[in-house]
Image (tube, coloured by chain):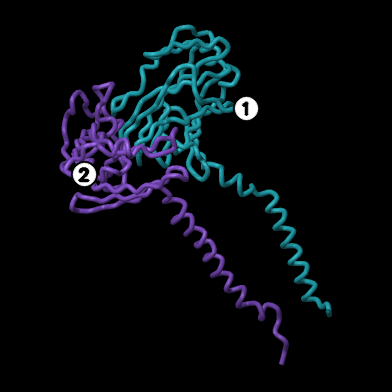
Chain colours: A cyan, B purple
Amino acid sequence: MKWDRTAALTSVIVLGALGVGTAVSTHLPKADDVTHAPFIVQGAVGKPVKLRTGELVVLGVDGSTVVTSPLDRAISKNGVFVVIRVRWTPSLKPQGLDVVEVMSASGRLYGDEQAVQSRCNPAQTGIPLTCQLVFEMPPSEVPGATLLVPSELSGVTGGDLEAHIALGATDESVKAWTARTDPIDLPGPKAGTTP
Amino acid sequence: MTTPTWWQRNRLALLSLLLIGPLALLSASFRLINVYLPWTYHVAHTDASGTVRLAQTYRYWSELSTAIEVTARVESATQVTQIGKVRAAPGSVLWQVTLTLAADPKAMLDVCTMWLADDAGRQYGTQAGKVGDMFDPTWLPDCVPKGAEGPRYDIVQGASRAERCSSSPDVDGRRAGGSSRRGHADPRDPGVSGT
């Protein structure tokens, strides 16, 4: 094969393109990571966040070592109950908030069954549901924590919207909550336009 | 005659990439939009006469496959202020929908779930948006008349209990001849397009 200037230039271009492609694919996220990653919608207390399936507002955040509901009373000896008051309005179909979690600043997730029942369902399409979500957490994990709410009840977040709402808890507020022994009442969800 | 350069020989192929690239992207998007996104457990059947025929085949493990065919007719859809103690949540209205359901006495039917859908495709369920009664009797539709239930699949025994239920009384030669009244609370006046 006769090597001329054009062939040499083509070889250089092809090898260069392969090198660039390898470098790019190495630094880009892997397909599995992208497939299972949600589209994150950042939010803050008091600001409505629109998800694909509804609108969420965190109305306020409180904390104590004691919480009471009509059926339960729970005391946290080594942790603190973080009580998040939210208003959820489904926009497509009736669905409540069942798979919400709190992520600490260190990246740990808190959720699942809690010592006291705090349901936020059932919810009707277009009708606001005001309720309280309770998470028992180690006090050191609360400052800088974020509430995570996926669009779907299934908890499958890949390719879907997920709200990340900063709870605004500080060292001072958590210290006050940890020292608190008066209970926070959890009256249960309330449907309707008046919170 | 001069030998054509690399660019002259490949310009058509390069130009075709401009067409092939977007086409490849569109074909991937086509699959996403037509296969992945509309993936649900149900397909809508609409009929202006108010009567629809629903047919589906269920498979219980590998032992039993059964076909279910139900005719559903909307008798009335009325906006009401109260059903028993149940009222609409503040800011919403209550709809009472009366249906007549008919099925073969041997069909395996147990419970059913219904929604109202408005013109925009939003779904409204029977389980939320209502106040006034902690034990809401309109929570779940009672589609199968008491005393005339059909066969059920026995998970423990691994067989249909059709023989046990074969002497159940029929209603007008059909089993589910009764009406089902359900209350749906909607935030506004929905056009009933299906249940």
Residue B132 seen from this side: yes
Q: Indicate the position of residue A49 as horizontal and vertical percent values.
A: 43, 35
Q: CA distance from mark 2 to mark 1?
A: 62 Å
Residue appearing at x 78%, y 75% in the figure: A7
- Amino acid of disc 1: Ser
Classed neighbour count for the residue bearing mark 2: other residues with Cα under 10 Å, few (<14), some (14–19), many (≥20): some
Residue at 53 percent across and 41 percent down: it is A38
Which chain is mark 1 on?
A
Q: Which mark is residue B174?
A: 2
Where is residue B49? Give x, y as percent: 18, 52
- Given residues A177 and B20, the one toward you in this image is B20
Checking the image for residue A87, the label placed there is none
At label 2, the amino acid type is: Arg
Residue displayed at 64% across by 48% down = A30
Q: Is residue A124 above or below residue A194?
A: below
Work out whether residue B143 can be spotted: no
- The answer as to whether the residues below labels 2 and 1 share one chain is no
B185 left or right of B15 in image: left
Residue indicated by mark 1: A106
Residue B5 coordinates in the image, percent (x, y): 71, 81
Q: Secondary structure at mark 1?
A: loop
Q: Is residue B164 left or right of residue A9?
A: left
Q: Is residue A174 above or below residue A17?
A: above
Q: Is B161 placed above or below A135 here?
A: below
> x and y percent of residue A140 in the render?
60, 18
Element on which disc 2 rests: loop
Q: How many marks?
A: 2
